[in-house]
Structure formats: structure tokens, C-alpha cells
Image (spheres, helix red, strand yellow):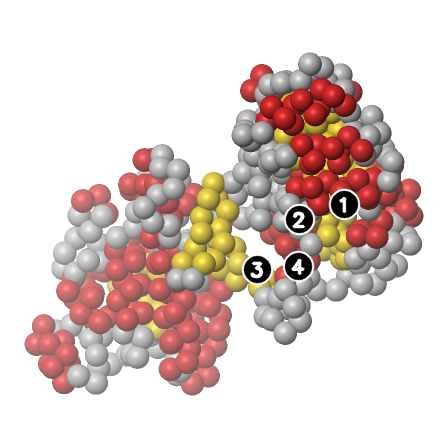
């Protein structure tokens, strides 16, 4: 008896080639619906599923392959005499290969695109992979044909690999359907979260060289990383990706003017808005040149030759931008280890996820509001318009710095950032020390309320004349009184932005 293959695909790319190749190797083909019509139209010998089952399609095509003659042929354990006897008794021929892929649910989620017959065939073949090959990815058509042509059968390892891919395929499909139902119900955090992730990038190493790292992509989705073009430099490490993500998101959250940010260990150590992108980069770098060593640079404008030359003497791990002037790109490429990324605009994930023992810690994304109508001014003096702009800029930067944080800003440029301190007073002192007099007349942002007035005093000593903070401390009155004494305008946002 010749080996038999069942072909039933929605994505018909390459199906004629594998069908013709199987026939040339002596295989018999069984197929359904549009797949059978395409194969026949291309001159490939094929038998309709309905002819095999003697049961025509019904329910508008919802029932085609759901039949004992099909699933008995797929699921039979050839080493089990009872199974073999059942096949003989019912005159069912075994099926040795299933080539199938599913309705494209993620492209247009709807009830009619929830595939039933496809996943059933795929899972059946994958379960019985000791005897049946299953192919769900057109990229495997060529290798499968080559192996069959060379040895006549698929090896145990190949069938096991294909089965694993098949179960991953149906798992991702079911995860997409569950997510669709969750969107319909509108739950912020649903009862269960089903993630299907595909490894798309091997990294040089993890957070440290002895760790293994990779980037995974949610099945059926794409991100800005997948549209990025790498113009040069070494392969990315885990921290390169992590920090570049932070830089690219921050630079796109600070408005539409020419903006540059410098990130080190996921924390901004520089950020600035200027009339020209080269000026913005220089200003951002000058915030904290020591921390900028080995940092990530992100800009929201074309990298000019002037900017590229400004980066010449600074050791930088990654630069990411929407585009590059040819001369600028040539200049940057002279630095062999610099990773140069040209990338599309990022999007923001709906959830933030971290691992905990036995599971995940999940929260909604932290969205920073700049709606002044929701803010209050508890001090006698209100900010000037220039102070308002600096306050908004400082508030956005502070939301992306590890807590506890104090950010000092002057003329839309961060001049001092105190990050990740266990108390707010130390964060303020570090920010003031880094500012070194440049914060005079500028703004101060605190990601959470000042529990004592000493935190505000550090901002005052640095020369800041306006402060933005959430408010909500039992000592708010004392802090506001301290601000009034110093002539500082203070804004309460009513919303904190801790980041751990």
C-alpha cells in the first residue's frame, strides 16, 4: 500500500509544490475543499475527502474532515494489533502525513474563523507522531520532501520536532481565541492569561555573560524590534535589548520636538529637547557624562552628521533612531562595536509582567497623564509657563526612573537624576550633586510624595523653583509650608509613578 498524505490548508503557499513532490515519490493525496480544487487545477492527482468518507461537506463547510475514516487513519497506533484490526474491519487506510494550517483567526477574529477540523487533525497527528508526520509550517515543506526523497520515511527526531511545532501552533491559536473573548468582555485583568511566545532572536548572553538569553515574540503579533534594521555592531545582549527598549519608549513619550535620551541600566541618565537633534544629544549627554559611558542613545529625529560627530568620543553601546543621514551612518560605522539601529515608532504593551515563584506578577501599563486640569497647586505661587513646561518634562522622565527618584530639569533638559534610592532625601541629594548648580530656576519632580520636608529642602538647595509630586502624605501641609517659605511653586498630580 502506498503511503498517504492528508493536505488541508488555509494558507496555500507552497502546497502545490509539496503535493506534487509527494505524488512523484509515490504518495497518495487526500484533500478537502479549496486545497483539493487547487491541487487538481494544477494537475496534481488528489482524492477528495468526501469521496473517502462518503460523507459530503455539511454546515457550510464546518464539517469536512471530522469523520472516523479520517481520524481513525490518523490516530491508529500501527504497533497495536487491536488498532490494526479496527482499521481492517472498517476498511480504513492509514494516513502517514498530515499537512495542515489553520484559519487566520488573528487577522480577522470572528466565530467563523475559529477552526475546528484543522486543530483536530493537527492534534491527532501530533499525538500519534510515532507513526504520523504533521506539518503546519510551509517552511518545513522543503526539508520534509528532501528527507522523504532521501530515506523514504521521516526520522523519529523529525516527527517529534514536527509534533512539537504542531502543538505549539494549536496552543497559540487557542491563546488568540481566549484573548479575543477577553477583549469582548473588557476585563482589565482576565481570569487567566494564555501566552504563546516564539523565539525570534538569540542574544549574545543574558544579563551576565554566564547566562543564556533570547528575545521572544508573542505569536501573531509584531513589535518595533521586528521592523528594526541593524546597520552595524556586535550582536545584542539581554541588557542591550532591555535598555534600548527603555530608551526608545522614553524618547517617543517626551513629545514631538527634537529629543534625545541616554539610558544606562534601564534608567535615564540624560534627556533633552532642543531645536536641533545634535544639540539635543549634547544636552542630554551633559546631564551625567560619567553615567552615559557605555549607555544607550535614542533620538526621535534623523541622526545628522553633526550628531554623529558629537558621539565620536563617547563610548556608546547602542544608538537607535528613525533614520540616518548617509554621512552620519558612515561615520558611526567606523566604530565596529557600536550597534546602530534604525527603527519604527514603538508601541506600548497592555501589561507589564514579571516572574515570581510559581507564576507571574501582572499589572496594567503605567500611563503618564499630563492633564493639568487634574492637577492642583497647593502653594501660594503658581508655576510660570516656563516652569510648567519643565515640570511636565521632569514628570515624564521621573516616571521612567527607578524609585525612589528625584529629577531636576532646567529648560527642557534633565540636569540631575537621583535614581533607585531607598529614601527620597538621598535621591534628592544625588540629583542636586549631579546638577552642580545647573538646576537654578528649574523644576524638580518626585515620583512619589515627600514624606518629610527635608526632601523638598534638597530641591530648594539645588535651586529648583518649581516642584511636581503626587501629594498624599500626612505631612503634605508641612511640605507645602516649606515650599511657600522658599518661594517654590508646587504641583500635586494625585498620581504616583513608582518604578521598581
Q: Are marks 4 and 1 in contact (CB under 8 Å)?
A: no
Report x, y in % for residue 463.
82, 30
Nearest to the observer: residue 55 or residue 373: 373
Report x, y in % for residue 371.
59, 21
Q: Residue at x 18, y 70 (%)?
A: 72
- Dot 1 surroundings within 10 Å: few (below 14), some, or many (20 or more)? many
- Dot 2 surroundings within 10 Å: few (below 14), some, or many (20 or more)? some
Residue 297 vertical position relative to residue 367 in the rendered view, above or below: below
Between marks 1 and 3 in the image, the one whose residue lies nearer the viewer: 1
Between marks 4 and 2 in the image, the one whose residue lies nearer the viewer: 2
Q: Is residue 44 visible?
A: no
- Dot 4 surroundings within 10 Å: few (below 14), some, or many (20 or more)? some
Say which residue label 2 marks.
421
Q: How far apart are the alpha carbons under marks 4 and 2? A: 21 Å
Q: Is residue 93 visible?
A: yes
Mark 4 vs mark 3: which is more N-terminal? 3
Q: Residue at x 57, y 64 (%)?
A: 214
Mark 1 vs mark 3: which is more N-terminal? 3
Between marks 2 and 3 in the image, the one whose residue lies nearer the viewer: 2
Q: Residue at x 69, y 36 (%)?
A: 455
**Which numbered marker is on residue 239?**
4
Q: How far apart are the alpha carbons under marks 4 and 3? A: 11 Å
Q: Are marks 2 and 1 in contact (CB under 8 Å)?
A: yes
Mark 4 vs mark 1: which is more N-terminal? 4
Say which residue label 3 marks.
215
Going by the image, does 65 lie left or right of 260?
Answer: left
Mark 2 vs mark 3: which is more N-terminal? 3
**Which numbered marker is on residue 430?**
1
Mark 2 vs mark 1: which is more N-terminal? 2
Report x, y in % for residue 178.
33, 47
Q: How far apart are the alpha carbons under marks 4 and 1? A: 24 Å
Amino acid at each position: 500500500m502506498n503511503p498517504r498524505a492528508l493536505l488541508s490548508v488555509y494558507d496555500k503557499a507552497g502546497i502545490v509544490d509539496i503535493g506534487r513532490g509527494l505524488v512523484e515519490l509515490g504518495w497518495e493525496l487526500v484533500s478537502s475543499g479549496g486545497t483539493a480544487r487547487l491541487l487538481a487545477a494544477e494537475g496534481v492527482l488528489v482524492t477528495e475527502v468526501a469521496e473517502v468518507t462518503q460523507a459530503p461537506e455539511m454546515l457550510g463547510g464546518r464539517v469536512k474532515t471530522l469523520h472516523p475514516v479520517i481520524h481513525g487513519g490518523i490516530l491508529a497506533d500501527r504497533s497495536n494489533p487491536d488498532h490494526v484490526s479496527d482499521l481492517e474491519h472498517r476498511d480504513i487506510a492509514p494516513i502517514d502525513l498530515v499537512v495542515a494550517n489553520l484559519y487566520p483567526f488573528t487577522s480577522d477574529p470572528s466565530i467563523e474563523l475559529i477552526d475546528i477540523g484543522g486543530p483536530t487533525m493537527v492534534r491527532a497527528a501530533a499525538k500519534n507522531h510515532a507513526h504520523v508526520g504533521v506539518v503546519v509550517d510551509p517552511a518545513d515543506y522543503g526539508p520534509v520532501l528532501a528527507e522523504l526523497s532521501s530515506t523514504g520515511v521521516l526520522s523519529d527526531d523529525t516527527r517529534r520536532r514536527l509534533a512539537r511545532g504542531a502543538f505549539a501552533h494549536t496552543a497559540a491559536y487557542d491563546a488568540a481565541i481566549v484573548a479575543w473573548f477577553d477583549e469582548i468582555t473588557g476585563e482589565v485583568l482576565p481570569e487567566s492569561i494564555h501566552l504563546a511566545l516564539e523565539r525570534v532572536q538569540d542574544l549574545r548572553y543574558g544579563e551576565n555573560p554566564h547566562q543564556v538569553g533570547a528575545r521572544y515574540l508573542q505569536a501573531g503579533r509584531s513589535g518595533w524590534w521586528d521592523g528594526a534594521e541593524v546597520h552595524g555592531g556586535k550582536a545584542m545582549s539581554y541588557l542591550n535589548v532591555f535598555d534600548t527598549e527603555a530608551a526608545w519608549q522614553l524618547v517617543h513619550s517626551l513629545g514631538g520636538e527634537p529629543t534625545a535620551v541616554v539610558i544606562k541600566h534601564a534608567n535615564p541618565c540624560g534627556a533633552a529637547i532642543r531645536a536641533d537633534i545634535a544639540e539635543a544629544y549634547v544636552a542630554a549627554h551633559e546631564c551625567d557624562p560619567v553615567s552615559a559611558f557605555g549607555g544607550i542613545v535614542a533620538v526621535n529625529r534623523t541622526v545628522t552628521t553633526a550628531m554623529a560627530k558629537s558621539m565620536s568620543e563617547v563610548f556608546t553601546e547602542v544608538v537607535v533612531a528613525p533614520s540616518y543621514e548617509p554621512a552620519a551612518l558612515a561615520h558611526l560605522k567606523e566604530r565596529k562595536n557600536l550597534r546602530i539601529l534604525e527603527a519604527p515608532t514603538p508601541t506600548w504593551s497592555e501589561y507589564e509582567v514579571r516572574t515570581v515563584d510559581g507564576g507571574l506578577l501582572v499589572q496594567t501599563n503605567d500611563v503618564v497623564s499630563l492633564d493639568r486640569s487634574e492637577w492642583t497647586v497647593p502653594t501660594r505661587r503658581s508655576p510660570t509657563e516656563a516652569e510648567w513646561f519643565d515640570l511636565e518634562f521632569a514628570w515624564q522622565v521621573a516616571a521612567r526612573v527607578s524609585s525612589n527618584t528625584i529629577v531636576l530639569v532646567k529648560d527642557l533638559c534633565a540636569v540631575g537624576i537621583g535614581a533607585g534610592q531607598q529614601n527620597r532625601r538621598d535621591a534628592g541629594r544625588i540629583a542636586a550633586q549631579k546638577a552642580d548648580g545647573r538646576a537654578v530656576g528649574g523644576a524638580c519632580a518626585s515620583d512619589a510624595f515627600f514624606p518629610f520636608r527635608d526632601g523638598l529642602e534638597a530641591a530648594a538647595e539645588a535651586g529648583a523653583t518649581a516642584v511636581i509630586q503626587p501629594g498624599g502624605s500626612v505631612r503634605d501641609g508641612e511640605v507645602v509650608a516649606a515650599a511657600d517659605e522658599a518661594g517654590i511653586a508646587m504641583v500635586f498630580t494625585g498620581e504616583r509613578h513608582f518604578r521598581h
